[in-house]
Image (cartoon, rainbow, N blue to C red):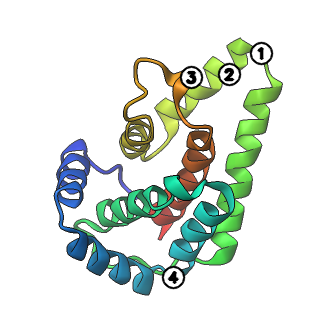
Amino acid sequence: MNTISGKIIDRTWKRINESTPEDIQQLTQKMLAEQPIAGAYLMAVEELLMPEEERGNLLLIGLILWEIMSAGRGPMRQVTQEEIEAAEALNVQFLEELEAGSEMDYQEGMQRLATTYNQWPILSAVVEALMAGNEDDPNSAPESVGMALLHLKTILDCFDKA
């Protein structure tokens, strides 16, 4: 799929963030009806990996990703469990390779991701949202941020192909 413009990303993110809880609930139900496997994946990740007080944000960002990726395209085809598992495996492999390499390898890998990833503007917005409040001191961010990013990128990869 074509790279989504920053304008669509910003407009959609703002609209969702300004929505009422009732509107969010309706959108979430619609997303879960259209993307049940992706929604179940995000909810399971939250339940398994995140403390109770941090739950809900992952599904909300997943909802925003779905809205952004649906903008101007109409409904996407349903993402399958196999697609999610394959995308997650590739993302884990990428992270393991970064971890195994040197600091230079890490920086080159991240630069390559930034220049070649089809939906880099969306991924950047996800990182910004996950790091909100911790921009000045990234080390103070919750430990769950890295795992949240891994799983949200997995869903973004799948939505990009749907």
> As shown in the figure, which amino acid type bears the numbered disc 1?
Ser
Report the disc number at residue 36: 4
Pick whichever of labels 3 and 1 is earlier in the sequence.
1
What is the spatial separation of the Cα atoms under label 2 and label 1, in whole angstroms? 6 Å
Pick whichever of labels 4 and 2 is earlier in the sequence.
4
The answer to whether one can see residue 111 in this image is: no
> As shown in the figure, which amino acid type bears the numbered disc 4?
Pro
Report the disc number at residue 102: 1
Q: Nearer the viewer, residue 30 or 1?
A: 30
Residue that protrudes farthest toward the top in the picture = 104
Measuring from the top left, give residue 146's x and y in whole percent: 60, 40
Pick whichever of labels 4 and 3 is earlier in the sequence.
4
Q: Between tags 3 and 1, which lies in front?
A: 3
Measuring from the top left, give residue 45's x and y in whole percent: 63, 62
What is the spatial separation of the Cα atoms under label 4 and label 3, in whole angstroms? 34 Å
What is the spatial separation of the Cα atoms under label 4 and label 1, in whole angstroms? 39 Å
Q: Is residue 108 left or right of residue 53?
A: right
On screen, residue 114 above or below 77: above
Q: Which residue is mark 2?
A: 106
CB under 8 Å between discs 3 and 1: no
